[in-house]
Image (cartoon, rainbow, N blue to C red):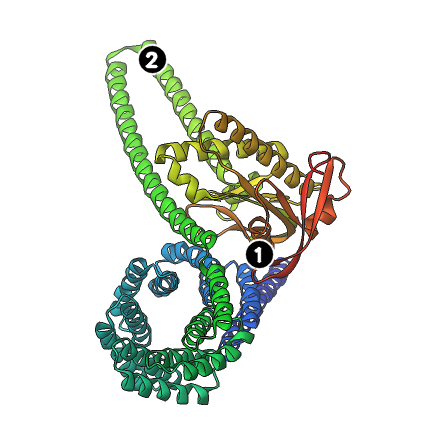
């Protein structure tokens, strides 16, 4: 009977393993299908549809708990967001993927991330930073010898050289790109190369050559049926027409381009169309139409790289650099601790040797008594030391992770990401931080931010919120994590109101002393999130999902001194005593459309 039972158990285990493997295979098939659908939508020029597919791919990658797949999806989502002109969100995805590739030592992923970060800086006209990241990507690609990726970098570097006033040098890179594309046989990329060469000749004043290459590019892209690329080429040709003084022809080309790209919501190309049409109408002395185009041009540029978005990009850069510096400091401290432990062990060894000499030189009971006493003292000291180090390690872990997550991490060596419903995400951001920072020295600025964040941390503890992270002058926390709990939305609102009260009181005190002070926006949205730890070192508990993005929109669309909440949060707290609400109607939010929003305050605090 025993062998028979063992056989049945083995079969059951085998069946269970097969089911698990089949389930993972299905998850990977769904992930692949979402990525393929995203690529197809990009080729069709339906960028919002591509964003929907790549968000679905992200959910599948999280379900698999596959770090490499998550990083790959983040990079592809950043490309979609660049096409839509949402460069801050694109850069956020790239800096989330970068540490994963670094941990995995994945050079291909690092090269992709460096190239995309360089492209965001290029569109932001931060050409020095763009060149630095392109060079980092180029160094990896040259080691790998992968020609299509090298060709892409040649094209990017050529465009960069054009815009810094070196079109003659740019021609060399564009021709290298074209040579590789012809060898591989890629009509769409050959059209891109022709367009870049045409633009380059235009800046050199060789307008016949410019027109020749741009018309050749236009013929190819029309055959490919790529509306976005066709629109891009029409704008470049329109600019050449402006150089030749043909304002009417430029207007017709750029109006055609705008008709093609407006349905795609391809904001970077639309911005180029508005610029071309503004110049064309100005050349035709149509002042009213020129003014309209100038207004649209300004709005497009503000949407992509307004002051707040530029500050957001800077935050991402500074936060990543700060994390790298912290990692280096942590490694140095670990090395110092390791050396101290070795010295301690050596000292203990010498003490043991000395005690042995003494013990062996003694007699009978004295030998036994001394040995027992020495051993007891050593064991107690060692136990106390080990317990002290364990307590310090646990305290540090609980300082960065919620207790259930820390317990799971210590028990299993990892903590799986999981979906949590009904989480209230709170974002705050200091208003006009750049201007304020110019009035304070570096030491004063850090001291003031530290005072604010220390107060915020205490408020989070009182209301049971989980602090997620800070990014420059932005503070992020969540209520209802790691496990859902009743009234978590109310706690998030009350915490935000108390934060605003503290900032106002601090401002009054500093103004009375003639010192500059901060004011703040706050926003809250409630919904499902994915929460967990990515990677296997330098743990950080984080949350992802559309709820986080919507909460960020609540903050950015709010007002100074107010707490702005979404309709989902309002539904949960509207019946709470002591709270009053000011409906704002439906407010436009980037990539989200119109969202219902409410200002919340304590009863009697506002009229």
**How many tags in the picture?**
2
As rendered, which of 351 and 135 lies closer to the eye?
A: 135
Examine the rendered structure and indicate whether residue 379 appears above or below residue 402.
above
In this rendering, does residue 64 appear at all? yes
Quadrant placement of the C terminus: top right
Residue 545 circle label: 1
Where's residue 416, x and y in %? Answer: 54, 52
The residue pinned by badge 2 equals 370
Q: Position of residue 221 (x, y in %)?
A: 42, 85
Give SS at disc 2: helix
Residue neighbourhood size for the residue with mark 2, other residues' Cα within 10 Å, grouped as few (<14), some (14–19), many (≥20): some
Mark 1 burial class by Cα count in 10 Å: few <14, some 14-19, many 20+: some
Q: CA distance from mark 1 to mark 2?
A: 65 Å
Residue situated in front as seen by the camera: 212 or 394 = 212
Looking at the figure, which quarter contains the N terminus?
Answer: bottom right
Q: Give coordinates of residue 340: x percent, y percent.
A: 29, 30
For the residues carrying marks 1 and 2, which lies nearer the camera in this image? 1
């Amino acid at each position: 009977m025993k062998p028979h039972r063992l056989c049945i158990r083995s079969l059951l285990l085998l069946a269970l393993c097969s089911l698990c493997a089949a389930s993972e295979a299905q998850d990977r098939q769904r992930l692949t299908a979402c990525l393929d659908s995203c690529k197809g939508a990009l080729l069709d020029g339906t960028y919002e549809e591509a964003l929907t597919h790549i968000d679905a791919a992200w959910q599948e990658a999280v379900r698999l708990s596959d770090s490499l797949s998550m990083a790959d999806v983040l990079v592809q989502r950043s490309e979609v967001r660049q096409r839509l002109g949402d460069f801050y969100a694109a850069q956020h995805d790239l800096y989330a993927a970068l540490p994963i590739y670094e941990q995995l030592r994945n050079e291909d992923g690092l090269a992709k991330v460096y190239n995309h970060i360089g492209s965001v800086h290029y569109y932001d006209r931060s050409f020095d930073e763009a060149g630095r990241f392109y060079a980092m990507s180029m160094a990896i690609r040259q080691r790998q010898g992968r020609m299509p990726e090298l060709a892409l970098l040649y094209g990017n570097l050529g465009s960069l050289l054009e815009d810094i006033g070196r079109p003659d040098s740019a021609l060399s890179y564009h021709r290298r790109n074209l040579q590789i594309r012809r060898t591989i046989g890629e009509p769409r990329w050959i059209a891109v190369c022709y367009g870049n060469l045409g633009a380059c000749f235009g800046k050199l004043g060789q307008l016949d050559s410019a027109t020749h290459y741009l018309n050749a590019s236009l013929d190819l892209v029309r055959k490919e049926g790529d509306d976005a690329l066709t629109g891009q080429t029409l704008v470049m040709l329109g600019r050449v027409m402006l150089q030749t003084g043909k304002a009417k022809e430029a207007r017709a080309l750029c109006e055609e381009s705008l008709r093609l790209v407006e349905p795609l919501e391809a904001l970077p190309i639309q911005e180029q169309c508005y610029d071309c049409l503004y110049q064309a109408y100005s050349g035709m002395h149509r002042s009213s139409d020129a003014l309209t185009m100038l207004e649209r041009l300004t709005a497009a540029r503000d949407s992509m790289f307004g002051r707040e978005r530029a500050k957001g990009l800077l935050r991402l850069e500074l936060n990543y650099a700060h994390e790298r510096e912290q990692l280096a400091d942590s490694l140095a401290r670990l090395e110092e601790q390791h050396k101290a432990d070795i010295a301690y062990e050596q000292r203990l060894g010498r003490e043991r040797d000395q005690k042995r000499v003494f013990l062996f030189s003694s007699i009978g009971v004295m030998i036994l008594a001394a040995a027992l006493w020495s051993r007891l003292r050593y064991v107690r000291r060692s136990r106390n030391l080990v317990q002290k180090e364990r307590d310090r390690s646990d305290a540090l872990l609980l300082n960065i992770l919620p207790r259930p997550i820390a317990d799971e991490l210590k028990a299993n060596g990892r903590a799986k990401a999981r979906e949590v419903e009904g989480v209230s995400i709170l974002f705050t951001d200091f208003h006009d931080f750049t201007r304020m920072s110019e009035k304070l020295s570096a030491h004063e600025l850090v001291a003031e931010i530290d005072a604010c964040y220390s107060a915020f941390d205490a408020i989070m503890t009182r209301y049971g919120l989980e602090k997620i992270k800070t990014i420059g002058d932005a503070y992020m926390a969540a209520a209802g994590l790691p496990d859902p709990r009743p009234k978590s939305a109310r706690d998030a609102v009350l915490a935000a109101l108390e934060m605003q009260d503290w900032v106002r009181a601090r401002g009054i005190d500093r103004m009375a002393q003639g010192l500059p002070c901060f004011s703040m926006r706050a926003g809250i949205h409630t919904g499902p999130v994915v929460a967990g730890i990515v990677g296997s070192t330098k743990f950080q508990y984080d949350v992802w999902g559309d709820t986080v993005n919507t909460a960020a929109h609540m903050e950015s669309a709010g007002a100074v001194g107010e707490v702005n909440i979404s309709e989902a949060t309002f539904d949960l707290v509207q019946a709470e005593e002591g709270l009053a609400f000011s409906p704002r109607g439906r407010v436009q939010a980037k990539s989200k459309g119109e969202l219902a929003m409410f200002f919340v305050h304590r009863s009697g605090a506002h009229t």
